[in-house]
Image (cartoon, rainbow, N blue to C red):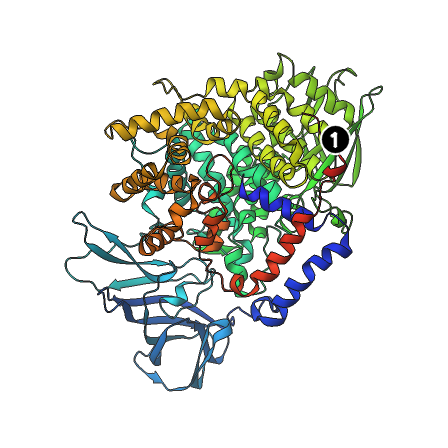
Amino acid sequence: MDKIFLAVAVFIAWGAFGPSLAEKVFEDPVSELEGNSEFYVDRDPDYYRLPKGVTPLTYELRMIPFLDEDNQTFKGDVTIKLLINSATRNITLHSRELNVSDIRIFEFNPPNVEIPVQNIRLKPDRDFLVVESQMTLVENKMYILRLKFEGELGDNNVGFFKRSYEDSMGRRQWLAATHFEGLYARMAFPCFDEPHLKANFSISVARPRNMNTLSNMKLKRLPVAEESKLLFNDEESSEARKQRVSYIVAHELAHQWFGNLVSPEWWTWIWLNEGFATYYGKLAMERIEPSWRMMEQFVVEDMQPVLAYDSSFNLFQPMNHMIKHQYDVDYAFDDISYEKAASVIRMMSDFLSESTFSRGLETYLNQRKYNSATDTHLFEAMDTQALIDQVLPANFSVKTIMSSWTTQIGHPVVTVKRDYLTGRVTLKQEKFSYFRWTRGAKKELWWVPIKYTSQNAGKFNETKVMHWMKDRSDSILLGSPPAADEWILFNVNQIGFYRVNYDDRNWSLLSNYLNSNEYRNIPPVERAMLIDDALNLAMGGYINYSVALNLTSYLHRESDFIPLYAAYRGFSILEWVLLQYHSNELSNFKEHMRKLLTSYFGTRTFEVTPVDDHVMKLSRNLLLPWACKYNYDHCKSKAIKLFREWRENSTKSIPSDLKRVVYCFGIKEGGNEDWDYVWNAYRKSSVATEKDALLLSLGCSRNDTKILGMDPAELQKLIKIATKQKASEILSEKMNLSDIEEGPFGEDVDYIWGFIPLTQEWMDKFGPNIESWLRWAHLQDPFNLRATQLEF
């Protein structure tokens, strides 16, 4: 089961029984956190920001890393040219985990005139290094600050850190690398570590002659990533891996403009970096490889999951993140700043038109180049271009429209009710929430762009917004109203970041049409939208599950990857709910799923052909394991046959897009010898993507004693490999460990989590509190399914 949606269900359970009980659930963990750790101290937003009286202009940085086995440290010195904006005796900059010495201040002109340093103070809670001079530094005058520093090369992939690898001779080699984004430059050298404080750098790195040095170029990042994130082997790597590597490259290239050329003024607006890089990373791939259908994939792989996240995990953060603590900066790099922002940017591009949006964006980048920006700068540039092109109604502004999406938490659900006699439609918007006790607590309103079509119109390529909904309710008369026995469909191409609910009659008309031979007249993205909206509306209690199940009953006809991917996520959470509260229905549910996936399983089987296109291969890699879950015997025989052939003849490779299924079934249905064979293959492989596939398949074993009985040193090595990144990154899908926890077939492998050492300190301290209310949540019936008769 998809981990995001498993957690969503748990969160829903917390709020399912009204505020008093939900608050009781939260009471102990939160009070414990607030009472025992400064982690959650609510500070003034400017508390962690540097004073505004000093601006860095240039850095001359010299560093010497040491990579001996017995000495893995670094030292260096930095010379910073400063402009004093307002008279002061203090120069405040950042430093964390560094030993700083020999701090000196000089006049810039005349040069080399030293100003004595009177005092040096550290403020560790803010990472401040305060250098106090004996005399006042004059406004609008430049000075030189020189410091020496030293520190240890860390192993947490932040600041200045070390990593090791094995060379072709099997020898361990060391490298040192940097990762500064966020609050980590201050761990490498003393600096003014805020995103708006841009400066020119001159960098020198000392190294032995037998080593190399790589650095950023002007406006170009030097991404540091695991091999499997950037390397692709056509014979060993899956189509999903090819797509992922392509996207990472496109995303990082987009940062040349969004992040490098123009940086956010503060971490509040980090979505100006990550949202645009996500959107343009996908759009660039769409333009280069249209057959990959990347913008259709964007809807089901980015937008729909973040709609769920935005209504469950995201209780506190709008796109413009509130930064009240330094730790909030790390958490600002979340799904809201990436996928939600990208979805809202996509919506803005659509309601402005691509040409107006592109010209407005060009103005924004030119106006703010080599500088920083807030969302206001972006919206003003868009407003200027929108006025020139006359793409918005009079008295409308991009800033007003977009602020409703960037400053408010969550998103709306638009309920559509038809008058079947007059053709008039009544619209109502409210904040969508899985938590029933939060509904109506705050009266949020969004500016909602409305596009719709109908069965008789069949227009799914409408370019202009047909109606703007800015009030809580609205009424519109549809142009060319459909007959009373024909459906209407809102949010064409799922371009708007909201959900749509209908009256029961229109849901029934849509369901009947999907169950007809004409269902393909509704494009794949819209079919995916209907599936995702229906299942999530049912999960939130807005409609009965029977409505959602009736609509999705057409899936026995479906063979397209896009709507099937939406169904995969939705049915995964439904299966989990049944497992918790309706276990007697599980066998019926699985039989129901087997019937629904008949068409898919018949077209995406194990027979790989040279004419298979990208989406066919991608579908096989991502969805075949799901289909196999319900066509178990047939899938098992196919997979085991390929696994045995591979074992008997190691030169016969398994098609890359089938490895996930084949390796897992081989482990799951095999014995100790099969497990050992895969483990040894993992140890011998030199291809990063192949090692990942083999490693993840080991979690499919039913024999936990096989893993528990491993040599402790080998087991620890396995754990270390599987958890190279921080727990927070794992939880935000930077590394997908769902395969280890469940295997690709949804079966729990609980003992695996026992091997994963969480690196977040508060998890160790407050884990028992968290576990207590998780256990409570599992005992509840958040969807009232005990009283619901589900018919499959």
Query: Measuring 39% from the left and 67% from the top, which residue is drawn there?
Result: 187
Residue 172 % position (x, y): 22, 55
| Residue 169 visible | yes
From the viewer's perspective, is residue 438 above or below residue 607?
below
As drawn, is 64 to the left or to the right of 490?
A: left
As drawn, is 591 to the left or to the right of 416?
A: left
Outermost residue on the top side: it is 517
Residue 134 % position (x, y): 43, 88
Quarter of the image where one finds residue 229: top left
Q: Amino acid at mark 1?
A: Gln
As drawn, is 534 to the left or to the right of 427?
A: left
Query: Measuring 37% from the left and 17% from the top, which residue is drawn there?
Result: 611
- Give the quadrant of the N terminus: top right
**Count of numbered marks:** 1
SS of the residue under disc 1? loop
| Residue 266 visible | no
Residue for badge 1: 789
From the viewer's perspective, is residue 743 above or below residue 211?
above
- Nearer to us in this view, 118 or 660: 660
Residue 673 % position (x, y): 31, 38
From the viewer's perspective, is residue 372 above or below residue 419?
below
Residue 740 % position (x, y): 44, 43
- Nearer to us in this view, 376 or 773: 773
Query: Measuring 48% from the left and 29% from the top, which residue is drawn there?
Result: 623
- Give the quadrant of the C terminus: top right
Within-10-Å neighbours for mark 1: few <14, some 14–19, many 20+:
few
- Nearer to us in this view, 413 or 576: 576
